[in-house]
Amino acid sequence: LRDPIDALISLYNFFDGWLMEPGCIEFEEFAVDHYLARNPPNNYWHHLVSWYQQRDNSNLLLLCYEQLKADFDKQLPEISRFLGIELDSELADTVTRQSSMEFMRKHDQHFDDHYLRSKREAAGALPLGSNSSKVNRGDSRVSRKDVSENIEKLMNQRWREFVTPQLGFHDYKELLAS
């Protein structure tokens, strides 16, 4: 799971320059007309609720992006237990190193969709050579500071419409704390 606003920002930055020509759709327009306009089952709130409802399923390990990012070392033993993999210090060091942003940025071609990108560029008449990496390089066009009060308000409204009635949480922070 991930904070819906951060998921929106990430999706926009991923699409901008790959599935849409760079800069052709402004963030606010994308947020309102694409992200917020979608109804279940094709919106993030439905995604979040449906996975959260499975949190006690023994075949699922529910993780929150913010917790992984904040304290990966604490989450790694839980992940290894879930996968049934013995985690010795050498494996823990390797996984930690190869899960770092530094490693992923250095090897971003292993985290992209270059084949699909080349086909998508041709089919969509998009500029060649777009970046399909799923790794944030730190130079994204949009960040949290670019989210307007209007978008914050609309996002909170969608949360109250979709999430609160089903899960009882008033916001993502409350869900995360649970």
Image: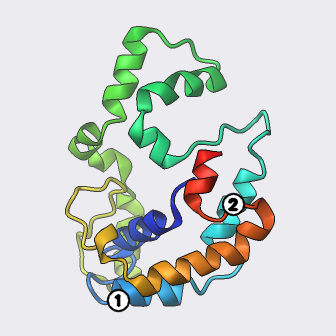
Residue 125 appears in the figure:
yes
Q: Nearer the viewer, mark 1 or mark 2?
A: 2
How far apart, in angstroms, are the residues tagged by discs 1 and 2?
32 Å
Instruction: Say which quadrant the C terminus sits in.
Output: top right
Q: Would you name the residue on which mark 2 appears?
A: 169
Residue 135 coordinates in the image, percent (x, y): 32, 53
Residue 16 figure quarter: bottom left
**Residue for point 74% across, 59% down:** 50
Residue 165 coordinates in the image, percent (x, y): 78, 69
Above or below: residue 50 compared with residue 25? above
| Snapshot colouring | rainbow
The disc placed on residue 120 is: none
Kind of residue at disc 1: Ile
Residue 10 coordinates in the image, percent (x, y): 40, 65
Above or below: residue 131 compared with residue 29? above
Q: Is residue 43 left or right of residue 10?
A: right
Above or below: residue 106 compared with residue 33? above
Q: Would you name the residue on which mark 1 appears?
A: 25
Quick one: label 1 or label 2, which is nearer the N terminus? 1
Residue 35 appears in the figure:
no
Q: Is residue 37 left or right of residue 26?
A: right
